[in-house]
């Protein structure tokens, strides 16, 4: 009898050794980890993270895994959830988009939490990162059309991958890994509604919950719990429930030789990925032509149909909160033109509420273009046209957003992103130590050392929850007060861009020695 899809994936993960992974893939894993930790530490003080941390603090638990950025510990599965929320909360972490989009670094917190619990090494962590990214990226290619086009969210796929990364850190055998996939996959089908229309906090929570599910599933499998072996291809499995047309061999052709990991894209802006290409075009156009927002009469953004559908509906022209603003094409492009940058500052509540900015984005039309659609997802094309009040017409087209492997963020770009997101919370020496640990991760015997280097001053520690009498009201220790993130003052008046104090560039004291990302090799066109 042929092996099931879950058995084949489990076999590959179980048999993979650190020595099987080429040096250039290991270096890509280090870049991925630097970017993920920038987002995780930068997201520690986000509203989403504060809410989840309050719940986790109240729940207590075995202090075995660290909430990154602090010296607080909780059980491994809640630490994985908390750290994934921090990583995802700004919508700033990495992405891969082919038939489906995904943010594979959402899975890294599972590996860190269980790696710390099990006393694993830096090599083990790098291997788990490679496993999570390689398989998740392949799952973004094997459905035709992608499951997102069918109304399902990509967190559905994450739930099939996170138990493999988690299970590798737990030391599961092939059979246990297979059951971990099945347990997690059975319970984590996520509807696309969380990323449609007016958005809620669930937009950045679905993937972390799938990571959480992967950790619990791996722990259950270790104790002998079983799942549905043919969860992919069996009766009423993933393939049948989501409408068929899955190309299984995409998951396995060249697995372990034709690596996807170096093809990951990084976000230069903390926004939904389909906004990244138009924002890149808009910034290039206004800077090259020295145009200011008050000279513009009308803006037209040409993009693909999917972008118009999810990023330019009526709710996106009057965003009330960050979750809608960073998924709004008119807001992201409008803020880019008015402020000449798109950073977390553009998603502060006072900036989103600026009436002059909201008035300006009403001038932005977002239109689908069939020619651009035909080229996607091989490239991520867009065009931005400006009609100036003088009557002059300007236009800028791009095929790739900054951060795409074909328009890569350099090592220094990633270092600048890391330093920018962590600057309010730690000094240069601490940041340099974190970077040095990532650079030398393969030489770290236990990842506790890496985790401990990321404790930010003032984040405190949490004690395990005390047992209470059944008749009394449970007492939970209030979350430790963290130093408030200093807010850059953004003027509400639209007559000038927000004046945030220019950040002095800090030279990295430790650099990743990573070769420049080479242009990905063209792969044969897949059968549709």
Image: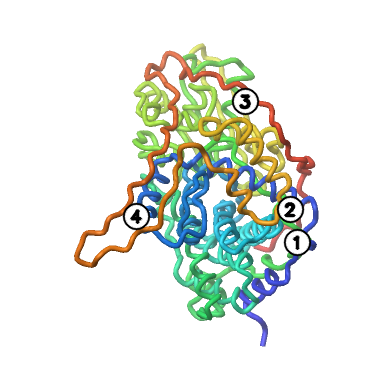
Residue farthest along the bottom direction in this orientation: 1
For residue 383, the mark is none
For marks 4 and 2, the one nearer the N-term is 4
In whole angstroms, how far apart are the C-alphas of marks 2 and 3? Answer: 39 Å
Instruction: Tell me the mark number nearer the camera, choosing from 2 and 3.
Output: 2
Where residue 409 appears, x then y in whole percent?
A: 68, 37
Regarding residue 176, the answer to whether it shows in the image is: yes
Q: Which residue is mark 1?
A: 18
For marks 2 and 3, the one nearer the N-term is 3
Please tell me whether mark 2 sits on a helix, a strand or a loop: helix
In whole angstroms, how far apart are the C-alphas of marks 4 and 2? Answer: 36 Å
For marks 2 and 1, the one nearer the N-term is 1
Task: Estimate how packed mark 4 is, as few (under 14), some (14 to 19) or many (20 or more) residues with alpha carbons within 10 Å.
Answer: some
Task: Estimate how packed mark 3 is, as few (under 14), some (14 to 19) or many (20 or more) residues with alpha carbons within 10 Å.
Answer: some
Q: Which residue is mark 3?
A: 284
Please tell me whether mark 1 sits on a helix, a strand or a loop: helix
Instruction: Tell me the mark number nearer the camera, choosing from 1 and 3.
Output: 1
For residue 58, the mark is 4
Decide: marks 2, 1 in contact (CB < 8 A)? yes
Where residue 405 appears, x then y in whole percent?
A: 70, 43
What residue is shown at x 64% (from left), y 68% (from top)? 247
Q: Which residue is mark 2?
A: 442
For marks 4 and 1, the one nearer the N-term is 1
In whole angstroms, how far apart are the C-alphas of marks 1 and 3? Answer: 41 Å
In the depicted view, which residue is nearer to us: 100 or 7? 7
């Amino acid at each position: 009898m042929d092996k099931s899809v879950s058995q084949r994936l489990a076999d590959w993960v179980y048999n993979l050794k650190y020595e099987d992974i080429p040096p250039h893939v290991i270096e890509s894993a280090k870049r991925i980890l630097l970017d993920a930790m920038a987002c995780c530490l930068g997201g520690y003080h986000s509203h989403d993270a504060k809410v989840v941390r309050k719940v986790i603090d109240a729940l207590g638990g075995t202090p075995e895994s660290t909430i990154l950025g602090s010296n607080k510990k909780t059980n491994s599965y809640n630490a994985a959830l908390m750290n994934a929320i921090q990583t995802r909360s700004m919508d700033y972490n990495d992405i891969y988009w082919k038939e489906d989009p995904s943010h594979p670094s959402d899975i890294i917190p599972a590996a860190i939490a269980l790696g710390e619990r099990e006393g694993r090494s830096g090599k083990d962590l790098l291997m788990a990162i490679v496993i999570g990214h390689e398989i998740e990226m392949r799952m973004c290619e094997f459905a035709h059309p992608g499951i997102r086009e069918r109304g399902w969210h990509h967190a559905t796929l994450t739930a099939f991958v996170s138990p493999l990364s988690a299970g590798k850190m737990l030391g599961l055998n092939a059979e246990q890994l297979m059951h971990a996939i099945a347990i997690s996959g059975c319970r984590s089908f996520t509807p696309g509604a969380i990323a449609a229309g007016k958005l809620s906090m669930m937009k950045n929570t679905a993937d972390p919950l799938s990571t959480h599910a992967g950790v619990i599933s791996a722990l259950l499998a270790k104790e002998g719990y079983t799942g549905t072996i043919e969860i992919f291809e069996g009766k009423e499995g993933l393939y049948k429930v989501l409408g068929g047309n899955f190309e299984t061999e995409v998951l396995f052709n060249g697995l372990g030789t034709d690596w996807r990991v170096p093809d990951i894209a990084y976000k230069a802006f903390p926004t939904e990925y389909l906004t990244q290409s138009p924002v890149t075009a808009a910034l290039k156009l206004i800077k090259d032509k020295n145009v200011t927002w008050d000279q513009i009469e009308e803006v037209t953004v040409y993009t693909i149909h999917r972008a118009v559908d999810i990023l330019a509906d009526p709710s996106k022209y009057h965003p009330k909160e960050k979750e809608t603003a960073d998924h709004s094409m008119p807001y992201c492009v409008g803020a880019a033109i008015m402020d000449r940058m798109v950073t977390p500052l553009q998603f502060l509540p006072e900036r989103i509420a600026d009436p002059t900015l909201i008035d300006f984005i009403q001038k932005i039309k977002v239109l689908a273009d069939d020619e651009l659609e035909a080229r996607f997802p091989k490239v991520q094309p867009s065009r931005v046209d400006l009609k100036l009040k003088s009557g002059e017409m300007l236009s800028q087209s791009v095929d790739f957003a900054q951060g795409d492997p074909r328009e890569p963020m350099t090592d220094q770009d990633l270092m600048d992103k890391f330093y920018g997101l962590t600057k309010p919370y730690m000094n240069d020496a601490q940041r340099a130590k974190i970077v040095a640990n990532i650079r030398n991760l393969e030489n770290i015997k236990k990842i506790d050392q890496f985790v401990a280097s990321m404790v930010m001053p003032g984040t405190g520690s949490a004690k395990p929850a005390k047992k209470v009498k059944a008749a009394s009201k449970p007492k939970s220790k209030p979350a430790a007060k963290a130093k408030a993130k200093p807010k850059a003052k953004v003027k509400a008046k639209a007559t000038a861009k927000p004046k945030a104090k220019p950040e002095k560039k800090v030279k990295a004291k430790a650099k990743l020695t990573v070769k420049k990302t080479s242009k990905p090799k063209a792969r044969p066109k897949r059968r549709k």
